[in-house]
Image (cartoon, rainbow, N blue to C red):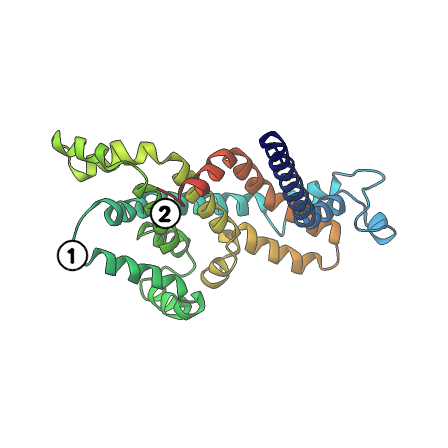
């Protein structure tokens, strides 16, 4: 076989591999989108059409009345739930971004005794189930009077930001050339200056990744608000959605409309940060 034939064979095999991979990914994407499709189409149907048609079928006549009913329900103030969730998510995400970046910088750039051992100890906390720390945390927050407030839902984020986020940012920081740090330190800059004016501006992709993860986690958190919040006026969207479900019972069109409303901000956040999100995931794996 000539070299030209071998090249054509390699190119054909590569195209075949990419085509198969594309088909697999497309099928997977369709499968994962099925629940979203069912939720959206059911939220646009009348109760009569839901009872007499397939849940997969697109509505014959689109109705937005379900969304108006959800947003104007006096027993479930979704505007208030949205505000509570938004405040908690923003404060929690800000805490994660700032403090996890600080800790990651220390592990990636600073030399101190026991650094590697402390980092391994930090990673080992990822194996600890959340249910193990649930009761001690509740006792702690009850002792300091934080139960039935939003403080337990976002203040802990300002104390390290979580082992996974620290690991993700540390891996990214290790890929930034150390010559930049050394040049700044030689010019008299402190570690704080290097962190804020050298490392952070170069870490937009990784920070966006951590920010998206953190915002989604805080927005979708159900267990935390369920444990700490008693006042209906302080409920978040996830807890309010559960309350709304108990009120409406079998009104599937209203439940699906409420679920879609809860998901809309997450879809917007992900689409807005998708470019940085994908770049951050790719770049945190290598130096």
Query: In the drawing, what numbered circle is on residue 191?
Result: none
Image-quadrant location for residue 199:
top left
Q: Are marks 1 and 2 in contact (CB under 8 Å)?
A: no
Disc 2 target residue: 96
Q: Is residue 240 above or below residue 206?
A: below
Quadrant for the N terminus in the image: top right
Place residue 195 in its image quadrant. top left
Q: Residue at x 64, y 43 (%)?
A: 71
Task: Give the structural element (helix, strand or loop) at label 1.
Answer: loop
Mark in front: 1 vs 2: 1
Locate residue 270, reporting x and y percent. 53, 39
Say which residue appears at 52% left-offset and 57% top-offset.
222
Asked if 131 appears above or below 198 in the picture, the reply is: below
Residue 72 can be seen in this image: no
User: Which label's residue is closer to the chain start, 1 or 2?
Assistant: 2
Q: Position of residue 234 (x, y in %)?
A: 48, 52
- The residue that mark 1 highlights is 113
Query: For this rendering, which residue is in front, 170 or 47?
Result: 170
- Nearest the camera: 111 or 137? 111
Q: Residues within 10 Å of mark 2 (few under 14, many from 20)?
A: many
> Horizontally, is 143 left or right of 49 in the view?
left
**Taking the image as drawn, is residue 17 in sight?**
yes
Q: Quadrant of the C terminus?
A: top left
Left or right placement of residue 286 versus residue 217 in this view: left
Q: Nearer the viewer, residue 122 or 18?
A: 18
Q: Position of residue 138 (x, y in %)?
A: 39, 66
85 left or right of 99? right
């Amino acid at each position: 076989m000539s070299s030209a034939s071998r090249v054509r064979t390699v190119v054909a095999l590569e195209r075949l591999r990419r085509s198969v991979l594309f088909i697999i990914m497309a099928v997977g994407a369709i499968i994962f989108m099925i629940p979203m499709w069912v939720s959206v189409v059911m939220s646009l149907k009348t109760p009569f059409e839901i009872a007499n048609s397939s849940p997969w079928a697109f509505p014959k006549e689109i109705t937005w009345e379900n969304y108006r009913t959800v947003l104007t329900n006096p027993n479930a103030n979704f505007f208030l739930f949205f505000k509570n969730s938004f405040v908690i998510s923003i404060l929690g995400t800000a805490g994660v971004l700032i403090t996890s970046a600080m800790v990651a910088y220390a592990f990636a750039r600073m030399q101190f005794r026991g650094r590697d051992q402390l980092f391994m100890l930090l990673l080992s906390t990822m194996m600890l189930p959340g249910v193990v720390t649930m009761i001690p945390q509740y006792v702690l927050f009850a002792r300091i009077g934080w139960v039935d407030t939003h403080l337990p839902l976002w203040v802990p984020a300002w104390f390290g930001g979580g082992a996974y986020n620290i690991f993700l940012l540390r891996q990214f920081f290790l890929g930034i050339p150390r010559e930049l740090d050394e040049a700044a330190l030689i010019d008299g800059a402190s570690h704080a200056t290097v962190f804020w004016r050298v490392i952070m501006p170069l870490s937009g992709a990784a920070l966006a990744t951590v920010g998206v993860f953190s915002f989604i986690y805080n927005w979708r958190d159900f267990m935390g608000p369920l444990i700490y919040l008693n006042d209906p006026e302080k409920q978040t969207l996830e807890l309010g959605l559960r309350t709304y479900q108990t009120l409406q019972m079998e009104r599937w069109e209203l439940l699906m409309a409420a679920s879609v409303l809860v998901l809309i901000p997450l879809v917007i956040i992900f689409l807005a940060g998708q470019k940085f999100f994908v770049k951050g995931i790719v770049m945190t794996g290598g130096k």
